[in-house]
Image (tube, helix red, strand yellow):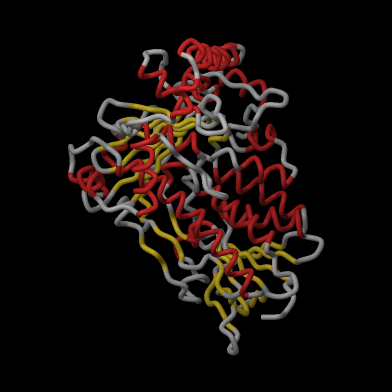
Amino acid sequence: MNTAVKKVVIAGGGTAGWMAAAALTKLMGKHIEVVLVESDEIGTVGVGEATIPTLHIFHRLLGLKEQDIMAATNATFKLGINFENWHDKGKDYLHSFGFLGKDCWACGFQHFWLKGKQQGLVSEIGDYCTEHLAARQGRFAVLPNQDYNHAYHMDASLYAKYLRKMAEGNGLTRIEGKIADVLQHDSNGYIKALQLDNGQLIEGDLFIDCTGFKALLIEGTLNTGFDDWSHYLPCDSAIAVQTKSVNAPLAYTRSIARESGWQWRIPLQSRTGNGFVFCSKYMTDDEAIDTLMANIEGEPLNKPRVIKFKTGSRRQHWNKNCVAVGLSAGFLEPLESTSIHLIQRSIVRLMQLFPSQGIDITDINEFNQQTKLEVDNIRDFIILHYKVTDREDSRFWRYCKNMPIPASLQHRIDMFSQSGKVYKYGNELFGESSWIQVMMGQGIMPKEYHPIVDMMEDDELANFLNNIKSTAKRKVDTLPPHFDFINHYCKANID
């Protein structure tokens, strides 16, 4: 398709649609026309309320101010995720943002910590990370020249509303209506237009599919194909309910493993988002609802609703003149809050490879190759939480512990188990500190540490470790309570 791309049509709203609309109109709106088609009658999934620090990149690109976004979306700060009962019942660990200790040219901090552990010189590894310590102590502030190693808990529907106002202010055309049909060019099968139920035709050069699990364009029309990962990630259902806040919000997400899945608890300024992700093979919807409702705090604000999904990924996220963004591209369950990140990455990657002079197969292939590497990395990281466990108390956990896993993940586990080594490759999302915290948290303790650590004398090692730990503690001691800072910095301005 050699036609210059002058008109982009976004099918669907929600978080994915409005993130795409805001970015394209802000950064490319002078050169292209952007149209978004959505129906007020079609609801959005809208349960994803936790993010990761990469969202700062997207906000900087759009020139958005942190305080404004947080106040508009009822947001709190997030410094990590606390995993409860994942390694075993009664055992918890925190996967925090930020970096563990200090590395050297030959090896990571974990090797110094491992030798210190052998000699009885260390406390838990999170004590050597400012964000980890701050999360546990409920302290936080945004300081001048601070690394942006924090994320947010926020209301996803309010976030979409905020971005919609921005996009429409930058010239976006929103068309209300249900998509009844998707028309294709006879010559090459490219999408020609969306036909609405009132007969209106919305033509375009490039289409972005944000139609959620239905994937009306990328799958319903183009039959792109789907790689099913439910044998790795067996949960296929989720229940969501909101409750009134009863305590000051924590600075981290809670992920609480249950008999046949896990529960999330996400604190916003004025309410709490709750949910339960489970496998219908081992638990009915009614049993899951009962489990969730028996383990919430505060008065429910809505009736629990059940959402069905299948974990996996489209075989191509860009096919012909259609790019799938969000749930239409696939779904990796919300365990590590990666959904909004993948939306953001797809949008930015599309703009980097934008086919202004016409759609070229080399751009499509590059987009899909980069996307596959990133999604596969996230998939492996999430599988790790299920696979490496001592839990055998239910059929669900026995399946997870014994299930086959990708060779790429097995390699990482084997390498860390033996030598404590872990690496981040290319543009992978999760860095070494994340892999270390989750592998140790799930019970893997390396047999060896890097020999370069032995170049340090024992007293030198002790001073090195103590200095890092005391520095982190001093920083955290200067921070105000998390909710006090929120009320000063970004108090919600919603009704």
- Residue at 45% x, 59% y is 330
- Residue at the (23%, 39%) spot, across then down: 259
Q: In this view, does 19 lie to the left or right of 398?
A: right
Residue 217: x percent and y percent? 52, 71
Residue 5 at x, y percent in the picture: 72, 72
Residue at the far front in the pictured view:
455
Query: Quarter of the image containing the C terminus?
Result: top right
Classify the position of the N terminus by image quarter: bottom right
Picture mark count: 0
Q: Quick one: which residue is furthest to the bottom in this view? A: 187
- Give the answer, above or below, for where 130 lies relative to 150: above
Give the left or right position of residue 390, taking residue 421 as reference.
Answer: left
Q: Which residue is drawn at 44% across and 31% down?
A: 450
- Is 405 rendered above or below residue 142? below
User: In the rendered image of this protein, does residue 35 appear above or below residue 443?
Assistant: below
Residue 267 in sight here: no
Q: Is any atom of residue 476 visible in this view? A: yes
Q: What is the x, y in percent for residue 185?
A: 60, 85
Q: Which of 394 and 173 is in front in this view?
A: 394
x and y percent of residue 471 in the render? 58, 14
Q: Relative to the observer, which residue lies in front, 22 or 401?
A: 401
Please identify the quarter of the rendering in which residue 229 is found: bottom left
**Front residue of this view, candidates 445 and 334:** 445
| Residue 34 as seen in the image, left or right of residue 479 | right
